[in-house]
Amino acid sequence: MKRIEFIKSSALLAFSGSLLNFQKADTGLTNWAGNLRYHAKQVVYPTTVDELRKAVLEIKQGKALGSKHSFNTVADTTETLISTSKLNKVISLDTVKGLVWAEGGIKYGDLGLWIDQRGYAIHNLASLPHISVAGACATATHGSGGTTGNLSTAVEAIEIMKADGTLMMFDKSNPKFYGAVVNIGALGIVTKVALKVYPRFEVTQEVYENLPMSALKGNIDTIFGLGYSVSMFTHWLDQNINQLWVKKKVEGTFKPGPKTILGATAATTNLHPIKLNSPINCTDQMGVPGPWYERLPHFKMGFTPSNGAELQSEFFVPRKHAYEALLALEKLHPEVSPILFVTEIRSIAADELWLSPAYKQDVIAFHFTWKPETEKVMAVLPKVEAALKPFNYMPHWGKIFTIAPADLQSRYPKFKDFVALAKEMDPAGKWKNGFLERNIYS
Ligand SMILES: Cc1cc2nc3c(=O)[nH]c(=O)nc-3n(C[C@H](O)[C@H](O)[C@H](O)COP(=O)(O)OP(=O)(O)OC[C@H]3O[C@@H](n4cnc5c(N)ncnc54)[C@H](O)[C@@H]3O)c2cc1C
């Protein structure tokens, strides 16, 4: 290492009495999108569970930090960030029980490749493989699927380090398991998870262009039934769904889909959901079969997902209200379109997880990739949320929203049970931050 580099990196390390290095974080540590500069005084990168325990015991207050892909302050703290980026290993594959055990900081892209090489897959993935497993499960991150749940529904067991450094394992025999999986970082640091695995499978991806929104009337189930995972993208112009992405499991010999679907026509080349962006970042389309972990996400592991400089919001409504909710949002197009890169519409199956927006209901998710124009986005969001209010919408835990905490809390039948679990796991409030104070503890 050159001397200057050494001095620079040494200066980042504030030795604090243990063998752990707490790095000063006032050096501009930001989230992935760059819209949030974390307010932490320091950040630590444990590499083992023992190091993690030392860090946990040493700090007064802190927060687990995954791969930093959330857009709001859910992962922020004014004290210590505990990065899980080095707690990122596969632990074991249990082929008898059909489980893979992995550390919480592992990214889906790395985990996917590892299990695929051994003949296995997990049920679904988000639009990008770059996110950590524990961070994604904490916020109920999802892909799309008519009959598949969000990513956290793959969790069969979860181990959490509590504020006192002890480890607590939850599995499905414990009713509190269902509160512990989607945990928005309130319970402690997830050290390892067991995810259900299936035999590996291949997927094809076919994209259709220009589906009239009117074709969705009475056809929501048909559309989301077109494949294993289906997404619609719109720019909210001309009452048009610009792209319909249909991901199908390959069963036997691949047969191309129809040339047209409900008025939409099959694309003749790979496309990016944001029409002006190059599809080079996107996973292969045009019906080319590929492993599940390279087709279920829209974006490739080694490339920038989505746009980069952007903000994101996402709102869930019960699936039975999908078409009415679409019409309500469509009316806002003059205000939404100019500040939007693209909207994605997906389907998520009901689950049993207390803080999941799909708790006991099938939902449709309306996602907004906004241009990085914070003031304008914050001005239009209350209107978007007002349009969805009649449908009892719920926001994505890791994206930007404005709903009042009391309204938010009223949407979750098991909300009080979750708060009780959080207080039981963290009686002194070591993991509290502004986000939790406002949305959970208020
Ligand atoms: C380009 C892009 C595309 C996206 N696509 C999708 C999508 O397709 N579907 C979707 O639903 N969301 C999507 N998201 C949102 C993203 O999946 C969520 O914000 C997710 O929570 C990010 O995971 P992370 O590892 O970055 O977590 P972070 O943002 O780092 O943290 C999120 C929360 O998890 C907690 N946490 C992290 N690790 C641990 C741990 N080990 N133990 C306890 N708590 C922990 C943090 O404290 C925080 O509360 C996207 C985001 C981006 C930037």
Image: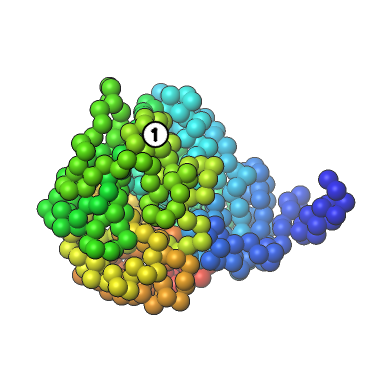
Left or right for 108, reference 97: right
Left or right of residue 395: residue 437: right
- Quadrant, the N terminus: top right
Asked if residue 91 is positioned above or below residue 221 in the image, the reply reads above
Q: Amino acid at mark 1?
A: Trp
Question: In the orientation shown, which residue stands out farthest toward the right?
Answer: 3
Closer-to-camera residue (337/139): 337
Q: Nearer the viewer, residue 12 or 307?
A: 307
**Along the viewing direction, whichever of 61 and 75 lies nearer the viewer:** 75
Considering only vertical position in the picture, is 70 above or below 254? below
Q: Provide residue 318's location: percent of width, then percent of height.
A: 22, 58
| Res 417 quadrant in image | bottom left
Residue 37 in view, yes or no: yes
Q: Residue at x 36, y 72 (%)?
A: 381
Task: Residue 264 in the image: state x and y as whole percent.
Answer: 21, 47
Horizontally, is 242 left or right of 160 in the view?
Answer: left
Residue located at (39% from left, 77% from top): 379
Is 58 drawn above or below residue 196 in the view shown? below
Relative image position of residue 414 (x, y in whole percent)? 31, 59
Q: Secondary structure at mark 1?
A: helix
Q: Which residue is mark 1?
A: 292
Q: From the Cβ of disc 1, is ligand 1 less than 8 Å away?
A: no
